[in-house]
Structures are given as structure tokens and as C-alpha cells.
Image (cartoon, rainbow, N blue to C red):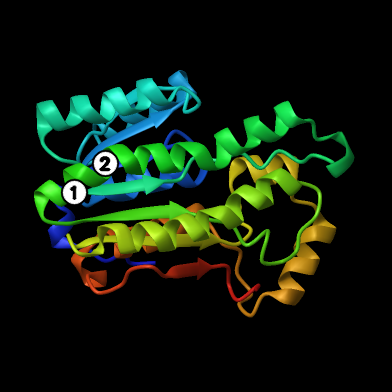
């Protein structure tokens, strides 16, 4: 697959959550290949440092990484403000980080529910809260919130996760109107079943793949790179009149 070059992304300041592995890693790699100025956070310090090292000699830009627990909103927003002060306003925000650990409805406690909302929804809001004024100051920007097909498919086995992911859609629509007058675009990118290392290790089975292949329109499996390329499109000027929308990348599963 030949990937397009979006010349307007070169030098743009991009902030990515959950960028050390899986889809997030592919997003970091894709923006660095476009020579963007990439900043990313992740809980896994070792994986984040390794990614920076690997990309330092890859021919694109080298990202800047900080290990941050996204449950600690103060630390997250402090770094966003620090980036602004030292480098200039963030122009692209990718809210990617999430955790789809399976759980039974009857086992969910109020404490677990709150933790799932914090892990899969709350930091989306507070990252955008910190970045939006910077984008308005800069005359525009693009915010890309990652959703999930799970709630569209009425998937069971992780009700707190699917609830949080459905709420991302409402947040995206509202924020798009909030930022629209200042040319801040806000869209939701919705992955299907992406063949990340985590999914292959924990959830992918021959039976599951067979069912997926029967339901998808396309015969291929969705890869992290497919989501990264869609993210580049929504970040670039090529999508300058697209906002308050969802882009589903699932091979026609839904």
C-alpha cells in the first residue's frame, strides 16, 4: 500500500494519547513519517521510550514522549500547557487511549464503573478542554476522538466500555459546534476489529475470525495502519470541511 503525503502536516504540532502500542503506535509512526512535530503520552514508559528510539533513525521526525497516567488529569493538562509555552499551540489532537478489558454486567461495582469512565471517556474531555483554547488562538485545528463499533453492534461482555464509547459520539458532536466558529474541526474515528498485538493475544480466535470474515464486506483484516491513515486524513487540510462526523474503518462490518 502506498501511503499519501499530506504536505500541510509537516511541522504541525500533534498530541496523541495512548501512543506507545497498538493503534496509537501506528498513529505516532504515521505522523512522524509526515514530519509532524509529535508529542505523545502513554502509561508504558518502556514502550514509549523504545518507540522514540526506533523512530529517531527512520527518516521522519522524532516524537517527544512522556509517561503519564491519564487518570491524573492535572499532569496531563500541565504537559499540554508546557508544550504550548515551549513549542507553540497544539494543532492536532488525537484522543486514542482506551482499555476494552472484558467484564460482566453483574460484576460491575460503582468503583469499577467510575474507573472505566475515567479510562475510556473522562480524559478525552479534559485533553480537549486544554487544547481547544490553543487551537482557537491559532485559527483552527483538528480533534479526532476514537470511538468503537462495539456499541453499534450491541456487543456484550464489556458494558461500561461500550457505554463510554457511545458517549464519545455525543461529546464529539457537541465539541464540534463549540469549536466550529473558530475553525476547529472535531470528528470521531471508529475502528472495527483491529488486529493489534493485544487483540491477537487476548481475543482473536479462529471462530471469531470466521464470523468476522462472514460479516465484513471486505475480505481483509483491519490493521492499525489503516486507522493511522484515516487519522492523517482527518488531521489534514484535505478534510477541512468535515466536522461533527464519524468515519468508520471496519471493512464494512457494521
Q: Check disc 2 and report its element: helix, strand or loop.
A: helix
Q: Percent position (x, y) of residue 179?
A: 26, 58
Instruction: Give the quarter of the figure containing the N terminus.
Output: bottom left
Residue at image coords 66%, 51%: 163
Above-or-below relation of 86 to 229: above
Residue at image coords 79%, 66%: 210
Residue holding disc 2: 131
Q: Are marks 1 and 2 in contact (CB under 8 Å)?
A: yes
Is residue 58 or residue 248 the one in the foreground? 248
Residue 35 seen in the current view = no
Q: Quadrant of residue 105?
A: top right
Q: Check disc 1 and report its element: helix, strand or loop.
A: helix
User: Most extreme residue toward the bottom, as rendered?
Assistant: 217
Is residue 178 or residue 152 the one in the foreground? 178
Q: Is residue 69 left or right of residue 39?
A: right
Is residue 41 or residue 152 the one in the foreground? 152
Residue at image coords 22%, 52%: 34
Q: Is residue 79 left or right of residue 200?
A: left
Residue at image coords 37%, 55%: 144
Q: Percent position (x, y) of residue 236?
A: 23, 62
Residue holding disc 1: 135
Amino acid at each position: 500500500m502506498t501511503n499519501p503525503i499530506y504536505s500541510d502536516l509537516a511541522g504541525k504540532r500533534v498530541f496523541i494519547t495512548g501512543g506507545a502500542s497498538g493503534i496509537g503506535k501506528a498513529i505516532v509512526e504515521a505522523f512522524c513519517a509526515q514530519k509532524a512535530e509529535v508529542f505523545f503520552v502513554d502509561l508504558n514508559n518502556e514502550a514509549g521510550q523504545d518507540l522514540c528510539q526506533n523512530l529517531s533513525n527512520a527518516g521522519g521526525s522524532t516524537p517527544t514522549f512522556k509517561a503519564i497516567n491519564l487518570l491524573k488529569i492535572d499532569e496531563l493538562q500541565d504537559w499540554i500547557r508546557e508544550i504550548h509555552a515551549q513549542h507553540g499551540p497544539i494543532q492536532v489532537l488525537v484522543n486514542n487511549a482506551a482499555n476494552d478489558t472484558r467484564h460482566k454486567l453483574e460484576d460491575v461495582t460503582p468503583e469499577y464503573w467510575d474507573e472505566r469512565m475515567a479510562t475510556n471517556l473522562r480524559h478525552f474531555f479534559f485533553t480537549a478542554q486544554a487544547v481547544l483554547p490553543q487551537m482557537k488562538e491559532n485559527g483552527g485545528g483538528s480533534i479526532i476522538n476514537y470511538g468503537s463499533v462495539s456499541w453499534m453492534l450491541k456487543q456484550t461482555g464489556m458494558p461500561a466500555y461500550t457505554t463510554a464509547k457511545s458517549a464519545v459520539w455525543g461529546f464529539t458532536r457537541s465539541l464540534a459546534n463549540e469549536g466550529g466558529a473558530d475553525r476547529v474541526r472535531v470528528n470521531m474515528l471508529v475502528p472495527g476489529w483491529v488486529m493489534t498485538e493485544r487483540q491477537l493475544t487476548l481475543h482473536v480466535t479462529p471462530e471469531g475470525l470466521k464470523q468476522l470474515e462472514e460479516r465484513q464486506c471486505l475480505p481483509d483484516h483491519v490493521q492499525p495502519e489503516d486507522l493511522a491513515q484515516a487519522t492523517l486524513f482527518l488531521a489534514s487540510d484535505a478534510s477541512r470541511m468535515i466536522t461533527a462526523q464519524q468515519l468508520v474503518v471496519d471493512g464494512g462490518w457494521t
